[in-house]
Image (spheres, rainbow, N blue to C red):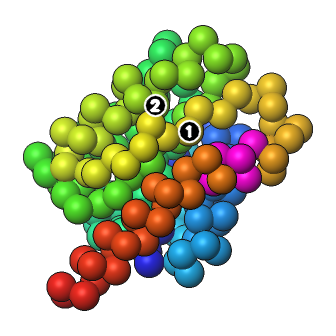
Amino acid sequence: MKITVLVGNPKPMSRTLRVAQGLAERVSTRVSGDVSTIDLAHYTDRVFTWPDETMTALTTTVASSDLAFIASPTYKAAYTGLLKSFLDRYPANGLKGVMSIPVMTGADAAHALAPATSLTPVLTELGAMVPCAGMYFKTPEFGRVDEVLDQWLTDNSAVIDLIMAATSCSAAKR
């Protein structure tokens, strides 16, 4: 299984990146997947360049994934402009067939619905399949990140099992 972590935090090597990678690594262990990571903070000088071979390669990486963790810090109850600018590179249905799990970080529970209300709609518009509400990680809990990620995986184990089954069926058809 090809798993991609896409992080739209403008700060390189952010806590959002660590949360999304931690979640992807846990899932990859369960499903025997390979994880690749795209930290958009390293591409801020290229995101508005058209055409750009590097950006095309990055969009292809995400679009060819079986499972993608799409992550962003919460800015004004939504995802970042950096992530939006990257997602705008896709045409309609550009993520068709990609299972996507939204991951967002924020300071408190006030924006806990942000993955479902802001990120899920754009992923769905791009044709991605979003099998669950995603994860909202409260940054004050960073001291217990492993516990929180393990609990998310436990709570969503049925979803992960469905992703595995769907990916196996899709691979068999290829």
Instruction: Name the residue that disc number 2 marks.
Output: 115
**Dividing the picture into quarters, in which one does residue 169 lie?**
bottom left
- For residue 42, say whether it is visible: no
Instruction: Tell which of 139 and 43 is nearer to you.
Output: 139
Q: Residue 158, position in %: x, y?
A: 50, 57
Q: Which residues are magenta?
A: 148-153
| Identity, as a three-letter code, of the amino acid under mark 1 | Met
* Residue 151 among those drawn in magenta: yes
Residue found at x 64% / y 17%: 109
Q: Say whether marks 1 and 2 touch (CB < 8 Å).
A: yes
Q: Main secondary structure of the magenta part?
A: helix
Q: Residue 138, position in %: x, y?
A: 70, 28
> Number of callouts in the render?
2
Instruction: Name the residue that disc number 1 marks.
Output: 135
Relative to residue 86, is residue 25 depicted above or below? below
* Residue 107 among those drawn in magenta: no
- Mark with earlier residue (1, 2): 2
Q: Residue 30, position in %: x, y?
A: 61, 73
Screen quadrant of the C terminus? bottom left
Residue found at x 55% / y 17%: 111
Query: CA–CA distance between discs 1 and 2?
Result: 7 Å
Determine the secondary structure under disc 2.
helix
Answer with left or right where residue 81 lies relative to residue 151.
left
